[in-house]
Image (tube, rainbow, N blue to C red):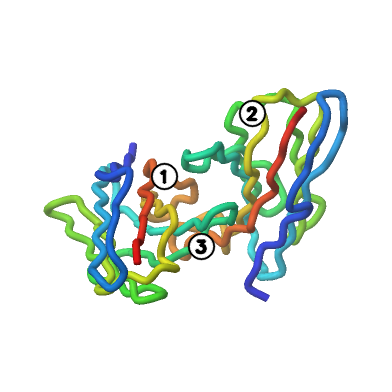
Amino acid sequence: AQSVTQLDSHVSVSEGTPVLLRCNYSSSYSPSLFWYVQHPNKGLQLLLKYTSAATLVKGINGFEAEFKKSETSFHLTKPSAHMSDAAEYFCVVTPLGYSTLTFGKGTMLLVSP
Amino acid sequence: DTEVTQTPKHLVMGMTNKKSLKCEQHMGHRAMYWYKQKAKKPPELMFVYSYEKLSINESVPSRFSPECPNSSLLNLHLHALQPEDSALYLCASSQDWTGANYGYTFGSGTRLTVV
């Protein structure tokens, strides 16, 4: 069985400051991990994915995440927030080789000028 | 083409109506999915099709009826829905059943309101 815990339901940052969205997972098997972003009334867009290759994963729009097996974490970071980053972010886990996804409850990122 | 296209974008239907949601992809993906998303919640899996065959039905009520006519097209037929079925319905696809290796591509969704 697998599960995902997103540690913050809301994160507020100022434009130009760093972003940290926290995600912890549990999985009985080697996991694949993803971060998706959802802007209001839109579908989900894949930001980045970890599938047992490099532990530091770079994604789109300047986001990156580091897979830390010892801490069972996959936190999402960005050095400098932009207003357009304001959205809901979902951390997702699935056992490697399986297709059904387990979603976290989401973190709403608010960016103020 | 790297998109999943969903139509319509918005749909309002009465509880006695019959309507259909359509999803199309031309990426050669062989697994397609329907998800339901309520406001401020993560998506919930409804159905999985793999190679045009229904692989998973997550105990979805029979008023939702999926159909996969070919490898590029996925429909969701709706009949006698309830107001609580109002939600964003998302379609997704992945390269194959082991989509975890590549991730899913999601459509923009159909915003359904049942009145």
- Tell me the subunit letter for badge 2: B
- Tell me the subunit letter for badge 1: A
Query: Residue placed farthest to the right in the image?
Result: B17
Q: Which residue is depicted at the point 72% across and 56% down?
A: B6
In the rendered view, would you say A50 is above or below B58?
Answer: below
Kindly identify which residue carries mark 2.
Answer: B60
Kindly identify which residue carries mark 3.
Answer: A45
In the rendered view, would you say B83 is above or below B8?
Answer: above
Residue B15 in which image quadrant: top right
Query: Residue placed farthest to the front in the image?
Result: A113
Q: Residues within 10 Å of mark 2 (few under 14, many from 20)?
A: few
Disc marking residue A32? none
Kindly identify which residue carries mark 1.
Answer: A103
Report the mark closest to the observer, 3 or 2.
Answer: 3
Q: Which residue is depicted at the point 37% across and 71% down?
A: A82
Q: Is residue B20 left or right of residue A54?
A: right
